[in-house]
Amino acid sequence: MSSYARPLIQEEVVCVWENGVFKTERVNGFFDAIRHVVRAEGVRGLWKGAGTTLVIGVPSSTIYMLTYDHLLNVTLPPLLSSSLVPLSAGIVARSLISTVASPLELIRTNLQSTPVSAGQPHTLRSVLTSIYGLARSQGPLSLWRGLGPTLWRDVPFSGLYWAGYESCKRTFARYGREGAWVAFVSGAVSGTSAALVTSPLDVIKTRRQALVMSSSEAPQVTSSFRLIQQIIRTEGASALFAGLTPRIAKIAPACGIMIACFEGVGKFLSSPN
């Protein structure tokens, strides 16, 4: 939301909830934004929307990993060459999960960009209320608005991530290296690389979802291509990489931890002992 506000107020801001007032404060980059949020809302402010993230993330990640693993080891090997299997499995798995979880992802983006209040407690009940209200006011299909940009970001990211991960893991294996730390490093490196490539798509996805949740009655750009043109014209090409630092700061450890846990727990559960 702060990124969307930039062309309107001609400066980089962070939105904070301080002493009962919703404010925008000028910041100088990612770490300065963290300082402002912590000062105004406390450390807990950095975890805004965490409950909603867990509600979405736990089941979707479970189904995603199960789907990818089945495609990787059972469905696709007879149909494709071994080099294309991880890429294709990642693309298919992410396409399915992103489509199913798109309404919840839209609501999560909204909850993380608004302050906590009695009417917005960031609970499962508030998520369901938000979904119902949006569907009632704008129609059920509005819950999937922005799915296209989401798929443009998540599908290439997933394909590149898994292709890079399997390639890194094979490289380590040739030198006799394996284990949880190999999975962590491979996941972090491939996740960072995929994030760099797909960062502009992430910006477009966030802008589209911010426009959907905005109460403004002003004309809105609904075409992703026109939105890209507008961003480049009004903010410059560098705006397509806005938020890259926090995105990589989240993705690198998250991808490493996730795949290390997946590999470690999987080996433990499959062990005959």
Image (cartoon, rainbow, N blue to C red):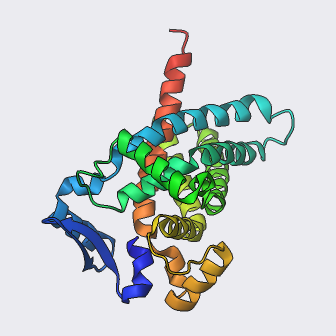
The residue lying toward the viewer, choosing from 11 and 144, is: 144
Q: Is residue 248 above or below residue 264?
A: below
**Horizontal and vertical percent position of residue 212:** 52, 65
**Horizontal and vertical percent position of residue 251:** 46, 54
**Horizontal and vertical percent position of residue 1:** 41, 70
> Along the horizontal axis of the image, is 126 left or right of 98?
left
Residue at (68% x, 48% y) in the render = 95
Residue at (59% x, 67% y) in the render = 201
Q: Is residue 212 above or below residue 102?
A: below
> Along the horizontal axis of the image, is 138 left or right of 41?
right
The residue lying toward the viewer, choosing from 217 and 267, is: 217
Residue 198 occupies which quadrant of the picture? bottom right
Q: Is residue 188 visible?
A: no
Point out the residue furthest to the front here.
Answer: 136
Q: Is residue 240 visible?
A: yes
> Along the horizontal axis of the image, is 188 left or right of 165?
left
> Along the horizontal axis of the image, is 6 left or right of 121?
right
Q: Is residue 221 above or below residue 121?
A: below
Point out the residue furthest to the left here.
Answer: 19
The residue lying toward the viewer, choosing from 239 and 133, is: 133
Q: Is residue 178 above or below residue 147?
A: above
The residue lying toward the viewer, choosing from 263 and 227, is: 227
Point out the residue furthest to the right here.
Answer: 79
**Horizontal and vertical percent position of residue 102:** 57, 50
Residue 220 occupies which quadrant of the picture? bottom right
Residue 27 occupies which quadrant of the picture? bottom left
Residue at (41% x, 46% y) in the render = 129
Total marks placed: 0
